[in-house]
Amino acid sequence: MMLDATPRDTVAERRALVANPCKTCQPVGAIYAALGVHGAMPHSHGSQGCVSFHRMFLTRHFKEPAMASTSAFTEGASVFGGGANLKTAVRNIFDLYDPAVIAIHTTCLSETIGDDLHAFTSDIEIPPGKRVVYCSTPSYQGSHITGFSAMTAGFIEHLAEKSGEPTGRLLVIPGFVNPADMRQVKRYLDDFGIDYTMLPDTSGVFDAPMTGKFELYPAGGARVAEIARLGDAAYSLALGYWASEPAGNVLKRSCDVDYQALGLPIGVSATDEFILALTRYSKIPVPPSIEEERGQLIDCMLDTHQYLDKQRVAIAGDPDHVLGLTEFCLECGMVPAFIGTGTPGGHFEERVRAILTKHGRKPDSCWVKAETDYFEIHQRIIQEPVDMLLGPSLFKQIARAEDIPLVRVGFPILDRYLHSYFPLVGYQGALHLLKAMCDALMDRLDRDSADADLEFVM
Amino acid sequence: MRKASQTYQQDILVERRSSIFTQGEERDEGDCARGDWPLSRGANKGSRSASKGLTSASVSARKSCRAHAMPAHQEPLSINHIECEKDSVSGAVSQRACAFCGARVVLNPITDAFHIIHGPIGCASYTWDIRGSLSSDSELFRNSFSTDMSETDIIFGGEGKLARAIDQVVQAHRPPLIFVYATCIIGIIGDDVVQVCQEAENRHGIRVIAVQAPGFSGHKAMGYRLAGEAIMQVFGSQPRLRSSGGRQDNQRDQSDPQDGERDQASGINILGDFNLAGEMWIVKNYLKQVGIDVQCGITGDSTYAELLRAPKARLNVVQCAGSMTSLAKKMRDNLDIPFIRVSFYGIKDTCDSLINIAQALGDELATERARRFCAEQSAALQPLMRRYRQQLAGKRAAIYVGGGFKAISLIRQFEELGMTTVLVGTQTGRPEDYVQIRRMVKAGCVVLDDANPAELERFMLDKGADILVGGVKERPLAYKLGVAFCDHNHERKQPLAGFVGVANFASEINYSINSPVWRYI
């Protein structure tokens, strides 16, 4: 087995080596964010291989085409700078793919050689009515999550203007989540009757229907004109401290639009907080449809709590997801045992410990670590086994090695289909997750039970 | 970078690299005779001239030269006039990967080697278990190791970190062989990776081989060459064991490959099979039945010890020509092992290859056995092929694969199924491949080099393709267009090589083309 080499006796300290990473680099997040803007062509300012990897990665997760162009650095460009490449690229892209906006992000290569996108782009002739935005996403900082927030911030920084004429709109930054999650958040906004702009919005892009026609720019996505008016927005809600808050902060700084950052609305409390934020903003009481949904969720949590109680769980993935998942597990009476993310920064450990404290656990009652990797998480699990794994496909090998049921959630999920069509956020999302967790644990009970104990009724 | 002719020969069928063009543009289909086609709107207006010299954008957007012009050109086609193997154009939505990716996918299947990717994390994440190479022994190669270079490492250099990373891998796992890949920025910041690897070899007494594969150094084919050089290094010398703590048992089973004693040579090496879905095992099994020994499969399901045996082989057979021709040439020049190209895709190519291998070895008995074996196997497939031909006859296929040689096999396979190939594209096809493709395809077939999604879409629809054979990025594109799909790349789940592969291929093509889902579009 792949993980046979994982030492089973001790957990060795590794400082120089990452083994089986729990993150990837910024540009893929930047591309995902850019594809949530209608008519945008993400452009990778670096070697041609980067964009090929990113497109492959997104395609493997969503099972959908992912378009992005590249500056295709050569050795020459790496020595003399990529300015000429970018100039050619922008011209070619507008000529040939005719996007509304080109969303340029950097790579480790272009950052290291010191390419100045501000200087380059101000030097490039942009066709009338077209826009170019850019952001800095060196792969040696942050992770795909910070890349997502950098690109979202880039759109706001370069497009949003303040005219002084309020639009009365709410900006919602949904976080690095699947299209189904964005649809779920939008449904709540619609239920409240709130006028909003969601940026980015990959619904209708990464879950576009089959029509017999390939759309280079699918119907979904935030409109450039809407983004341009964000400077006059009434307020912003940033869902996710890592993936969304920095962009909310940029709009606050550039156009003085106040914002509130919330965790991803995963589970009961986090969704409550989000719904209450909508109530506060709209001054409208919670619509009965949402009340009903919440009630259904609580009902189902009660029905199933006997199977979830005290179940030990290891949670890994992106920090905003992991926070939400941790809290939902606690709400279900489960015991988070190992909690890790590969993404650095953002006070991950403090935030997780705060959640533990809030739910009456000792803050050090479980192992929490940012900038960790699957190799280390595996070693911890070997020391103190858990009942369930909650995280991306990359958990799969650990699930096999230790014979632990895995519930796939987050990014990337490369080995299953349709996952991006079912929400994780909101009360509906929690229902889906609850079902998946119960199915996993109860399938395991059935598998492991003696013949005499195998029951029709559970 | 290889220089290719800027002059466009009238009879060249290869669509120029990254021929990015606007949808709905008027094209003069019949006219393939002009030497220099103004193709894109931009080129007509002259606004592209600035890009000349930097990239091939200005001359790239060529019309597709239709094959109905073919009969007019009977003289042999000069391969110097085919433009391929060039860099992608800035601004292209290229389907191609980089040199690092090429090196990584070739070396990855060596099952007891460890791969440390020296650079920021992305390159390790994207290539973690990137292809489904199966192993009969260790699965350790499927782990992903990286130095995860951070900003401070970039500023202060990553040599120390790399050295520690190698130490940690050696301490934890004691592999016999480690490949260290230097990605884009490592050369830029000036890390001396070769030196660090050399020192690690000295410290640990195992092979630590630097693969300097920055993405900007070229596309995937460049990476294949770099992988070939790394494999030559594996053959080349023993680890310099200076410290006493090193593992000695790596030393067993090693003979000096450079001793020139070719008379002891026996068997063959299979180059360019990566044991996807166990294909290497199928091929090895056929060879065993025919009575031909295999020294080493490079690199599918190989080990360090097997690689060291490779120089003893009498013949190299090259399956994935795109990735392995450079290594085959080096082994021919340095180790005196001749090579032949083979393909185990399709009945005819599988039979031809087995017989050719036996003949190239001058082994009459094996040749006879190969003939008999192939005749039996082909005959056994015929009833199945007849059934599939009834389902598939007249259907039109589009091919978009990595290498040219695979495209050639696929064209033949579609012929065996009674289908017509209407579009052929490759990422890294070489001029000779395109010459051969041109000879094989029927009139009207479009041939593209480094096609982008817009081109694939246009020509698939234009030509009424029923199915596309391609890789991961092409699958959703095909489905969106209402075109069936078969993955002939990393994500194949059943073997497509050999006689069993013929049956699997036909079945995949059939279930995708004739899926009931198409009725509901």
Image (cartoon, coloured by chain):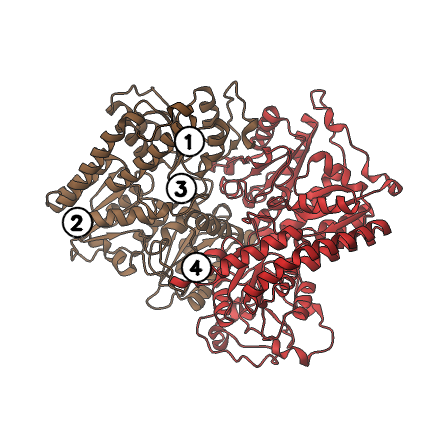
Chain colours: A brown, B red
Look at the numbered disc 3 and give the secondary structure of its residue.
loop
List the residue tagged with mark 3.
Answer: A411
**For the residues marked 1 and 2, what is the alpha-carbon distance in whole angstroms?**
36 Å
Report whether mark 1 lies on the same chain as mark 2.
yes
Q: Chain ID for label 2?
A: A
Q: Position of residue A323 (x, y in %)?
A: 32, 33
User: Which three-letter amino acid code belongs to the residue tagged 4?
Assistant: Pro
Camera-side residue: B498 or B233?
B498
Report whether mark 4 lies on the same chain as mark 1.
no
List the residue tagged with mark 4.
Answer: B516
**B46 sits left or right of A295 in the view:** right
User: Which three-letter amino acid code belongs to the residue tagged 2?
Assistant: Asp
Report whether mark 3 lies on the same chain as mark 1.
yes
Task: Specify few, some or many for label 2: CA neighbours under 10 Å numbering under 14, 14-19, or 20 or more.
Answer: some
Q: Position of residue A190 (x, y in %)?
A: 19, 51
**For the residues marked 4 and 1, what is the alpha-carbon distance in whole angstroms?**
34 Å
List the residue tagged with mark 1.
Answer: A405
Q: Chain ID for label 3?
A: A
User: Which three-letter amino acid code belongs to the residue tagged 1?
Assistant: Pro
**For the residues marked 3 and 2, what is the alpha-carbon distance in whole angstroms?**
28 Å
* Quarter of the image where one finds residue A455: top left
Q: Residue at x 34, y 37 (%)?
A: A436
Mark 3 / mark 1, whichever is N-terminal: 1
Look at the numbered disc 2 and give the secondary structure of its residue.
helix
**B358 sits left or right of A211 in the view:** right
Mark 3 / mark 2, whichever is N-terminal: 2
Q: Quadrant of the C terminus of chain B?
A: bottom left
